[in-house]
Image (tube, rainbow, N blue to C red):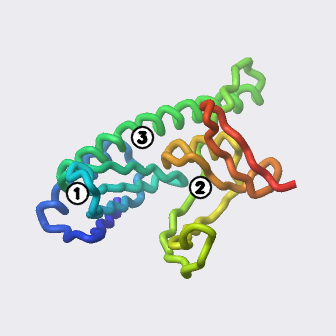
């Protein structure tokens, strides 16, 4: 696993780096196949001293991104909290992947003539998270301060929904493999999903 550690508004000392490497090493043993991990620790001047350190970890697992973010009063606690949150992400990911694999095997068996129910679950889709700064533009309220770019491979609606959950987002843009249209899936207030597509 390739590990990248960044600090924003704080210095990453040797002790903190060693602690991060130890925690990510444990995660790597739980989930083989992580190609690289990006850890960002940031100091933010907030009113509460208990959430001034922000720890965000992004794991690249095949074609899937798993991400977690936690706040704490110090770097060690923030790293411990984000590692715990990632453990939960990994459990959901492994469960989804297991169901997906069963679905594929069931589909293959059904083609061969066996009567097996097909689960319909699939693996999460692809997304590469870029972090390029955007040129400042003036909008109605605020400025454009960041642009994210990523490769879009054709993805089903189910895969897009799963990827959105792994990233912890309320919406996710993807290239729909069925309609071949750029689409946005989003989480509705009632807990269901909505889909936006061009005509």
Identify which residue is drawn at 40% across, 53% down: 34
**What percent of the width, then of the height, locates residue 135?**
55, 81
Res 28 visible: no
**What percent of the width, then of the height, locates residue 194?**
70, 40
Residue 102 higher or lower than 37, as above or below: above
Mark 3, secondary structure of its residue = helix
Q: Quadrant of the C terminus?
A: bottom right
Judging by the rendered image, the residue that carries numbered circle 2 is: 126
Judging by the rendered image, the residue that carries numbered circle 1 is: 21
For the residues labelled 2 and 1, the Cα–Cα distance comes to 26 Å
Q: Which mark is residue 4?
A: none
Residue 104 higher or lower than 140, as above or below: above
Q: Which mark is residue 89?
A: 3
Q: Residue furthest bottom?
A: 135
- Disc nearest the viewer among 1 and 3: 3
Viewer-closest of 168 and 121: 168
Mark 2, secondary structure of its residue = loop
Residue 93 located left or right of residue 52:
right
Q: Residue furthest top?
A: 115
Viewer-closest of 183 and 180: 183
**Picture quadrant where residue 84 is located:** top left
Along the polypeptide, which appears first: circle 3 or circle 2? 3
- Disc nearest the viewer among 3 and 2: 3
Identify which residue is drawn at 80% across, 47% down: 178
| Crowding near the residue tagged with mark 2, few <14, some 14–19, many ≥20 C-alpha atoms within 10 Å | many
Residue 115 higher or lower than 120, as above or below: above
Identify which residue is drawn at 49% across, 46% down: 168
**What percent of the width, then of the height, locates residue 139?**
62, 72
């Amino acid at each position: 696993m390739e590990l990248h550690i960044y600090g924003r508004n704080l210095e990453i000392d040797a002790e903190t780096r060693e602690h991060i490497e130890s925690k990510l090493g444990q995660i790597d043993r739980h989930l083989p196949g992580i190609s690289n991990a990006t850890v960002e620790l940031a100091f933010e001047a907030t009113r509460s001293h208990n959430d001034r350190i922000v720890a965000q970890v992004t794991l690249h697992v095949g074609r899937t991104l798993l991400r977690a973010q936690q706040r704490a009063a110090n770097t060690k606690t923030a790293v411990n909290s984000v590692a715990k949150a990632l453990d939960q992400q990994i459990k959901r990911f492994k469960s989804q992947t297991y169901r997906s694999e069963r679905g594929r095997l069931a589909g293959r068996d059904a083609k061969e003539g066996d009567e097996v129910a097909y689960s319909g679950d699939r693996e999460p889709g692809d997304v590469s998270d870029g972090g390029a700064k955007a040129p400042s533009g003036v909008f109605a309220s605020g400025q454009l301060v960041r642009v994210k770019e990523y490769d879009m491979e054709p993805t089903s609606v189910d895969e897009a929904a799963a990827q959105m959950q792994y990233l912890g987002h309320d919406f996710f843009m993807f290239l729909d493999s069925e309609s071949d249209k750029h689409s946005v899936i989003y989480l509705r207030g009632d807990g269901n999903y909505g889909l936006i597509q061009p005509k």
